[in-house]
Amino acid sequence: MDSIRKINNTIRDTTINTSPITAEAPKEVFAMPNETVSPVKIIPKSIKIILFILLVISIASISAAIYFYRQSKLVVTKSETVQVESVKDIVAKVGKLITLPEGEEPTLATVADPTQLQNQPFFAKAKRGDQVLVYTTARKVILYDPVANKVIDIAPLNMGNPTNTPAPTPAPATIPKPVAPKVLKK
């Protein structure tokens, strides 16, 4: 019987502390040795709202910038494609009317204001919307009316030829001879 009493006394001595739970845990539980526990800083609700709004605005701004950048790249690519197709279409139409220089892609221009070009004989019959095909290698200029589907004029391209003009020769450089210094006597 003594052994049972000893076991009961041992169990009674090792019982779990049933005291009420407090709101604060002892600092020793969370603190590292040689470390002080600092109080938690609480951010006011108004600052949290302002930070959230700034975050949303930042994300929206970055998204809009990326979207518009991509759209601008699409527009540039489409306009270049349209210009290349337009040049090919005009060259094909003019090529059905006359023989065009081969092996060269022409530069295409559109007459916007024929009154400014009236003093040049080549543009005397030009109208608004007429196309000018310039072949620099073949030295030809063609004025084409896309509405009437007619070639209005063909002329040679006159522009300065830098290969025919001799390059200026530099004057020979003269190197002065060294002069011996004069010694002044007193």
Image (cartoon, helix red, strand yellow):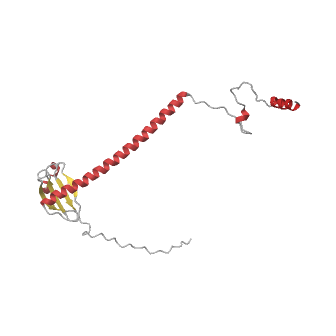
* Up-down relation of residue 152 to residue 72 (above or below): below
Between 51 and 157, which is closer to the camera in this rendering?
A: 51
Point 25% across, 55% down: residue: 84
Q: Quadrant of the C terminus?
A: bottom right
Coordinates of residue 152 in the picture (x, y in percent) = 11, 56
Point 46% across, 35% down: residue: 56
Is 72 left or right of 85, judged from the image as shown? right
Q: Residue furthest front?
A: 1
* Up-down relation of residue 75 to residue 28 (above or below): below
Quarter assignment of residue 121? bottom left
Quarter assignment of residue 167? bottom left
Between 170 and 13, which is closer to the camera in this rendering?
A: 13
Quarter assignment of residue 138? bottom left
Point 14% across, 63% down: residue: 99
* Up-down relation of residue 166 to residue 150 (above or below): below
Q: Quadrant of the N terminus?
A: top right
Coordinates of residue 70 in the picture (x, y in percent) = 37, 46
Q: Residue furthest top?
A: 20
